[in-house]
Amino acid sequence: MEVSIVDYSKERITFKIKGEGHTFCNLLRKELWNDKSTSIAGYRMEHGLESVPIFVLETEDKDPKKVILDSISRLQKSIKDARAKLTKAAR
């Protein structure tokens, strides 16, 4: 995964995520919406197999980089919890 920022301002960020597809992008998009300061969160891909996803995030009163970092932390915790539950169930 390679992340590059295309545009950044106080309340808006546009970034690309090279090497990822719809699976990760949908997880991240959904988690970004869990932050109360998010006013716009979405991504687009020209083609699902060959394109680089381009995200747009707008916030109302919070630094968009902080919103992304908080969302990633929550995703990591959710994945860790799911892994523990699946491992326990598989035993």
Image: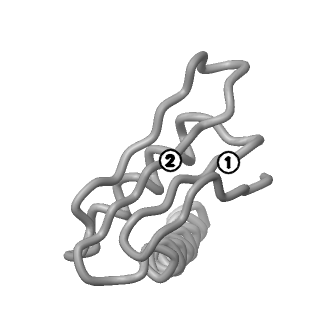
Q: Say which residue appears at 47% left-offset and 56% top-offset.
A: 28
Q: Amino acid at mark 2?
A: Phe
Question: On the picture, is 23 further left or further right than 40?
Answer: right
Mark 1 is on which residue type? Ile
* Image side of residue 52 versus residue 68, left or right: right
- 53 relative to 72, above or below: above
The foreground one among 71 and 11 is 11
Determine contact: label 1, label 2, CB under 8 Å: yes
Percent x, y for residue 32? 37, 64
Mark 2 neighbour density, 10 Å: few (under 14) some (14–19) many (20 or more): many
Residue 76, position in %: x, y? 56, 74
68 or 11, nearer to the observer: 11
Query: Residue at position x 65%, y 47% from top?
Result: 16
Q: Nearer the viewer, residue 89 or 19?
A: 19
Report the Cα–Cα distance between label 1 and label 2: 8 Å
Residue 82: percent from left, percent from top: 49, 68
On the image, the x and y values in percent for residue 17 come to 67, 48
Q: Quickly name the residue at label 1.
A: 17
Tag 1, which secondary structure?
Answer: strand
